[in-house]
């Protein structure tokens, strides 16, 4: 058996394909390979194969692997394991390494997807104002006071853009100054898989952006006086702000605005979609805004209020409108 026949060799090629051809996100790549590594470990320990190959992936072996994985793990984990295996097998078959795909005969366990948490419109409004209204400790040091004012304007801008354009936290953090087209009120977003999309920036987000731009030069490294020349959102030391920092700040402002300590950046993305849908926006438009490749993903992100459902129903159903039943039956 040559090295090219080994399963680990194919897994390395699969990783390369995911990263460079499919352009999957690093998180997706690591998730797939982590799941598939558990299969390799199973073949070593349970099936006693020192150098497993693609031929080792028989239906009984795969069922045994999933049975072993299911002990102490939930349906979500097992379903994800099956998805990772299917992605690998489809790749292997497409590239001529696998004749028959045993993963097609596997059944993934069913599980209920949780609806993402959202924020009400009033709570979202209070959250947007929280950076400006947050109590600040008075200080005699002017430089510290200036820094706090700049941070407040930065955070409000960050929240307004994240919510107003429905961004993922990584997309907000990755924004560059060159991505903002102030004249058209739009931003270029690099999403999952390096896919780009153009999103609108609302008037409040643009106002917050203008206010932040006026004080952005203050955010410099206190020792070197340098700052990241590209990033929109900077840390106190002039470096691009991190995802972790945004998560912490959103939680802090969320607690001030709503009293709950469970607010996180993704809730703003979901709130954007939900509020647009409740306001009558088309689901396809929301799909484009959020950068979803599948409409089913958009549907899962949004929960429709009963008021919105009833308004659409009353406006669209011929028998729901006043006099509709009479017209439908031919009575005048």
Image: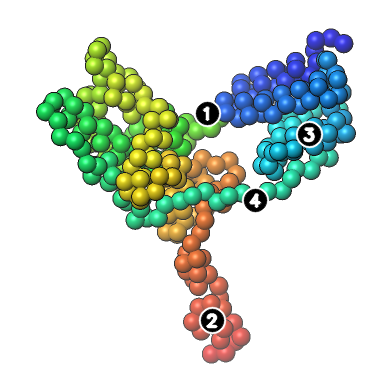
Q: Is residue 301 at least partly visible in the picture? A: yes
Q: Nearer the viewer, mark 1 or mark 2?
A: 1
Residue 105, image quadrant: top right
Q: Can you see residue 276?
A: no
The residue most toward the bottom is 332
Residue found at x 15% / y 34%: 138
Q: Can you identify the residue that label 4 sits on? A: 112
**Of callouts 4 and 3, which one flags the residue occurring earlier in the amino acid sequence?**
3
Q: Mark 4: few, some, or many residues within 10 Å (few <14, many ≥20)?
A: few
Q: Which residue is mark 2?
A: 324
Name the residue carrying label 1.
194
Q: Residues within 10 Å of mark 3 (few under 14, many from 20)?
A: few
Compared with 123, 132 (above or below) is above
Element on which disc 4 rests: loop
Residue at 84% from the left image edge and 9% from the top image edge: 2
Secondary structure category for the residue under label 3: helix
Q: Nearer the viewer, mark 4 or mark 1?
A: 4
Disc 3 to disc 1, C-alpha distance? 36 Å
Please identify, in this view, whether the residue under mark 4 or under mark 3 is nearer the observer.
3
Between marks 3 and 1 in the image, the one whose residue lies nearer the viewer: 3
Q: Position of residue 55 (x, y in %)?
A: 87, 23
Cα gap from disc 4 to disc 1, whole angstroms: 29 Å
- Which of pointers 4 and 1 lies earlier in the amino acid sequence? 4
Residue tagged by mark 3?
Answer: 68
Q: Are marks 1 and 2 in contact (CB under 8 Å)?
A: no
Q: CA distance from mark 2 to mark 4?
A: 38 Å
């Amino acid at each position: 058996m040559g090295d090219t026949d080994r399963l680990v060799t194919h897994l390395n090629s699969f990783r390369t394909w995911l990263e460079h051809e499919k352009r999957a996100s690093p998180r997706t790549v690591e998730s797939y390979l982590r799941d598939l590594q558990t299969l390799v470990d199973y073949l070593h320990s349970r099936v006693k194969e020192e150098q497993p190959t693609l031929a080792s992936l028989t239906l009984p072996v795969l069922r045994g692997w999933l049975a072993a994985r299911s002990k102490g793990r939930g349906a979500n984990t097992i379903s994800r394991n099956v998805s990772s295996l299917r992605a690998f097998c489809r790749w292997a078959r497409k590239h001529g390494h696998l004749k028959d795909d045993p993963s097609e005969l596997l059944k993934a366990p069913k599980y209920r997807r949780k609806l993402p948490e959202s924020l009400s419109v009033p709570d979202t409004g209070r959250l947007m104002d929280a950076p400006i209204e947050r109590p600040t400790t008075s200080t005699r040091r002017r430089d510290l006071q200036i820094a706090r004012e700049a941070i407040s304007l930065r955070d409000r801008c960050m929240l307004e853009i994240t919510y107003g354009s429905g961004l993922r936290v990584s997309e907000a953090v990755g924004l560059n100054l060159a991505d903002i087209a102030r004249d058209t009120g739009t931003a270029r977003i690099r999403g999952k898989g390096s896919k780009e999309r153009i999103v609108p920036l609302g008037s409040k987000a643009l106002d917050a952006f203008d206010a932040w731009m006026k004080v952005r030069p203050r955010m410099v490294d206190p020792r070197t006086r340098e700052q990241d020349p590209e990033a929109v959102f900077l840390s106190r030391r002039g470096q691009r702000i991190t995802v972790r920092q945004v998560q912490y700040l959103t939680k802090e402002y969320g607690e001030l605005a709503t009293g709950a300590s469970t607010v996180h950046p993704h809730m703003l993305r979901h709130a954007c979609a939900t509020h647009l849908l409740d306001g009558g926006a088309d689901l396809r438009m929301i799909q484009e805004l959020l950068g979803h490749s599948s409409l089913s993903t958009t549907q899962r992100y949004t929960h429709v209020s009963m008021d919105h459902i009833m308004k659409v129903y009353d406006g669209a159903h011929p028998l729901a409108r006043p006099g509709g039943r009479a017209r439908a039956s031919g009575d005048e």
